Amino acid sequence: MAVGINALAVTFVAHALAVIAAIMVLVWSISYRGGLAWEATNKNLIFNLHPVLMLIGFIILGGEAIISYKSLPLEKPVKKLIHLILHAIALALGIFGICAAFKNHNESNIPNLYSLHSWIGIGVISLYGFQWVYSFIVFFFPGGSSNLRSGLLPWHAMLGLFVYILAVGNAALGFLEKLTFLESGGLDKYGSEAFLINFTAIITILFGTFVVLTASAKSPSPSSSNDDTVDYSYSAI
């Protein structure tokens, strides 16, 4: 069921929140944590790639992929291609971000996969990859039958939103985990960095909320009766 608001209007707020979240995580990683690097003697610089890539690359681009399919006033084949490409980039950057965390742990002699955040993260990236691959095969190439597409459409939408909501929640959990480690190491609990981390998590949650609202809002263009030319929306659930 669609929410009685226009999807295009909601996206403006989502885009603004995405920019704010991206700036905040970059300020934190560069100004407070020392910068970004794939190879460095200071292994913390390697880890800094993780929150940047997971938030900007995975959460924000993944959210924009969802938004693009619902709100862009374009023909369906164009929106489908944009949706597919943005999700592919988000998946690739998400994998790269997880690799950065593993690299940091391995080079710092820190155990891997010991926290709830890491467990959920592996589950999210696996489900995201599964969703992209089967969606590519069914909806893009070689493409399933009309009956198969129409039957899988609501499941595609429901699984996609479930994985995305789980990703946003796990991102907030990751910020909490990192802040807890920093505070246990002496970071001021009421200092500017602690507030920046907490507010970045809040903005991330708000962005995810507006992505879901966009997916549930009214489409800006009318739908047609043909399944493969329908202006598909997540409200099809």
Image: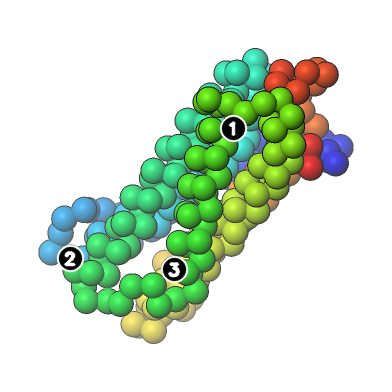
Q: Is residue 143 above or below residue 226?
A: below
Specify the amino acid type for callout 3.
Ser
Q: Amino acid at mark 1?
A: Val
The relative height of residue 9 versus residue 194 in the rendered view (above or below) is: above
Residue 127, given in percent of the width and then of the height, sits at: 53, 53
Q: Are marks 2 and 3 in contact (CB under 8 Å)?
A: no
Residue at 50% in and 40% down: 133
Give residue 8's quadrant in the image.
top right
Q: Position of residue 47 (x, y in %)?
A: 30, 62
Q: Secondary structure at mark 3?
A: helix
Query: Disc 2 marks which residue?
Result: 42
- Residue 154, visible in the rendered structure: yes
Q: Is residue 19 visible?
A: no
Q: Which residue is mark 3?
A: 118
What residue do we see at 25% from left, 65% from top? 104
2 or 3: mark nearer the eye: 3
